[in-house]
Amino acid sequence: EYAVDKAAVVQSLGGKDVAEVSNGVFGDGVQGYQPFDPFPTPGSKGDPAKAKQLLAEAGYPNGLSLKMPFRNKDVEPQLAQTIQASLEKAGFKITLIPVPATDFYSTYLVNKDNTKAGQWDIAATGWTPDWMGGAARSVFVPQFTCDGGSYNYANYCNKNVDALAKQAMTSTDTSKVGSMWHQVDVAIMKDAPVVPIATRKKILYHSARVQNFVPYALAVDGDWTDVSLSQ
């Protein structure tokens, strides 16, 4: 959590106009999102000294070797190298494994046998909510529940967190649901099963002739049922 240079990753993605640092499991636009930073570092650039100290306290004074597969396409090799560089400053030894995009999940992340066999240790993944607004459950359930599906890459299980999430999912008090989900976010990050790094912004372009262009979350574009063209 302290080792990753999140600011460098944002820069690799194209800068602050198209990405921003992320510190929790729920992104902006999802009910329950609140800005917080449980592992702060100067300028979100990482704190190698603190990370080395924590590694030593955990019993790894000489560092820790980890395997990191990455999809060998688009900007992902650059992102992997950026993450590798910051982790190695903190005392980790990262072996990068280039993988075809078609094999990234099937061969590594969701393959329990290969996971148990130690073919990979960490990986840079992404997640998009299934809808905007009250979509926290679409982020939490697949990735963080004790009985979740194959997308719980870290095999994370905290029954207290599950109980908090159940309260949020069954509450009829809409004024409190957002706060409940934020408590879930805080509790997950206290356990640190993942390292949130960056959130990508979607840049939507349209001609000045296109009228009533309103972003539509599911299409990740404008709502084409309402647009018109000016003459």
Image (spheres, rainbow, N blue to C red):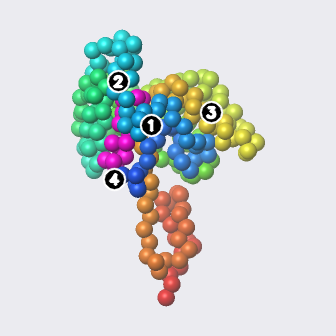
Label 3: how many Cα within 10 Å (few below 14, some 14–19, many 20+): some
The residue lying furthest to the top in this view is 59
Magenta region, residue range = 1-14
Q: Give the spatial CA distance, label 4 vs label 3.
A: 31 Å
Q: Which residue is mark 1?
A: 196
Secondary structure beneath dot 2 equals helix
**Relative to residue 85, is residue 225 depicted above or below?**
below
Residue at image point 34% right, 53% down: 14
C-beta proximity under 8 Å, tags 2 and 3: no
The residue lying furthest to the front in this view is 42
C-beta proximity under 8 Å, tags 2 and 1: no
C-beta proximity under 8 Å, tags 4 and 2: no
Q: Which residue is mark 4?
A: 14
Sequence-wise first label, 2 or 1: 2
Residue at image point 61% right, 28% down: 162
Sequence-wise first label, 3 or 1: 3
Q: Which residue is mark 3?
A: 183
Instruction: Say what amino acid the circle numbered 2 marks.
Output: Ala
In reply to whether residue 8 is colored magenta, the answer given is yes
Q: Give the spatial CA distance, label 2 vs label 1.
A: 20 Å
Q: x%, y% of residue 161?
A: 60, 27
Label 4: how many Cα within 10 Å (few below 14, some 14–19, many 20+): some
Residue at image point 34% right, 43% down: 9
Instruction: Say what amino acid the circle numbered 3 marks.
Output: Gln
Secondary structure beneath dot 1 equals loop
Instruction: Say what amino acid the circle numbered 4 marks.
Output: Gly
Secondary structure beneath dot 3 equals helix
The residue lying furthest to the right in this view is 173
Sequence-wise first label, 2 or 3: 2
57 horizontally vs 192: left or right: left
